[in-house]
Image (tube, rainbow, N blue to C red):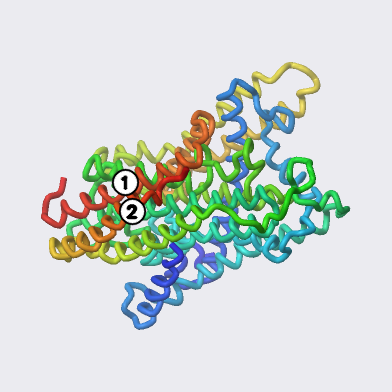
Amino acid sequence: MQQFLNYLNSTQTPGETGNFAWATIYILIIFGGISVAVIAMNWLERKVLAHMQVRLGPMRVGPHGLLQPIADALKLLIKEDIMPAEADRLMFWMAPVIVVITAFTVFIVIPFGPTHAVTDMNIGVLFMLGVSSLGVLGIIMAGWASNSHYPLLGALRSSSQMVSYEIAMGMAVISAILMTTLTADGAGTLSMIQIVQAQDKQQMWFLFRMFPFGFLAFFIFAIAMVAETNRAPFDLPEAESELVAGFHTEYSGFRWSLFFLAEYAAMLAVSSIAVTLWMGGWMRPFSHWLAGDTWDAFFSFFPAATFFLLFVVALAGTVRMPKHAAFKIQKAGLGAFALVLGGIGVLLLIPPVKDRIQDIYWFVAKVSVFMYAYIWYRGTFPRYRFDQLMKLGWKVMIPVGIAVLIVVAAAPAFNFVW
Amino acid sequence: MRLTALYLFASFSDFQQGRGSVQMPENYVPAFIFIAVALAIPVVTLAIAKAVRPDNPFGTKLMPYECGVDPEGSARGRYTVRFYIVAILFVVFDVETIFLFPWAVQARTLKAFGFIEMMVFLAILIVGYIWIWKKGALEWV
């Protein structure tokens, strides 16, 4: 127990302390967190999309459909799993496994706080880019192994789209790396933790650094990451009207849900990378502009305040439930959920917890902005045509990416920085 | 960034010789634990699903899906050559990106010299880029 508290207080990542039991606990916490985030995202996406289209969305399973994702997971678990007779059995089996592994492995280098990363590799950014792009292999395998027309076309589209946008993404990432060299000692870094620390030292998010070039690089990354994860408006690989469901047309049951899990885990991963590179990672907003103990104390109440707000929303939902005997259980359930949220809010007010939760809270808050944006894009933008998509990737994103890269490199090289 | 794997390997040997800022093995073992857990999740859930799901296959059910009609031809046929062009162009530009990373870390130390060196390298690539644009390799119609 004492040792455990020592690890909590240490200033090193689990990888650096060299205790693998501690590292394993950490890894399991991260997997639990991702699973909860995917479940929450599944519910939120349906609800938000529904409300954008003036519908109600899931309402039947649990109060306001809160238990819908769990019901879906159970349904998929007991559903028959069809493997086409002509499929390449080994590849068909391996494809979802590879996609899931690559989607999760990126989280090794994501820093949720100065000490809250599984391990701090000094080549973190390269590791992230290398691993996240291996997901293409799983998609190609899925499309090829199905031995069917739609999956093959979906896989080809998906892979060519992902590799095209990966170049622009790489350019944007290099611009961020170049910005890390603008600290006083002039040393650049590829470590994700040190990238955030560089933003702390420069007292500015890279989003606003060398305005508007930091913003442009971020903008390129933000577009490329939507294309990388095959989400709307770049969801051509699974364009329902043309390709049924793209590369996972032949997948059913739990294998399909692994692709679903991987897609959402990849969305979380790229959003986390965008937050780390451009939006100050775990730093709270205005950490230098509004500095001082008073402001620190003010911002430290945000985690609890968020949960109290959710508590009030859930409580309002409980009160507004129809007054009918059939809604009794739903009402009790939503009330209990509100109390759980309020309880978490109270828990976050206890000083030791409050201090330790700050980094993680701000990181998660920034990531959730991106996750909401993903739903928003899907609700508002029409889908691209494939030639438009490739044109945007090769003829707009890459030249702009190279131009931003050259400017960001040129200014410091000739001692002209703003 | 498949070529990143090569770079990762190079840095790996750097660590072993103690040139890295952190000790190699301690920092990388959690990564392997993480990958093992990530492998366990799909394998275990698929095993559970296999135990509880019904299994009742028959010929029509196992046919490739083509919106209800019998499948037309084989999926192992030919497809447009443009996907190959994209693949080739990707390799070229991806190698370029990998070469930019080491320079980006040292950009401030190398100052104008490093910048001009890298611009020469980029200029060669940009000439190639303009050429493929003019040649119509980026057109998709």
> Neighbour class for label 2 at 10 Å: few (<14), some, many (≥20)?
many
State the quadrant of the N terminus of chain A: bottom right
* Left or right of A33, for residue A167: left
Residue on which disc 2 sits? A171
Residue on which disc 1 sits? A217
Is the Cβ of the residue at disc 2 closer than 8 Å to that at disc 1? Answer: yes
Looking at numbered disc 1 in the image, what kind of residue is underneath it?
Ala
Residue farthest along the front direction in this orientation: B135
- Residue A95 on image: x %, y %: 64, 60
Comparing B83 with A364, the one in front is B83
Looking at numbered disc 2 in the image, what kind of residue is underneath it?
Met
Q: Which residue corresponds to the image point at 45% horizontal and 47% vertical from the top-left?
A: A225
Q: Please tell me whether mark 2 sits on a helix, a strand or a loop.
A: helix
- Residue A352 on image: x %, y %: 45, 50
* Left or right of A108, for residue A167: left
Residue farthest along the left direction in this orientation: A415
Residue B130 is marked as none
Q: Please tell me whether mark 1 sits on a helix, a strand or a loop.
A: helix
- Residue A71 on image: x %, y %: 74, 41
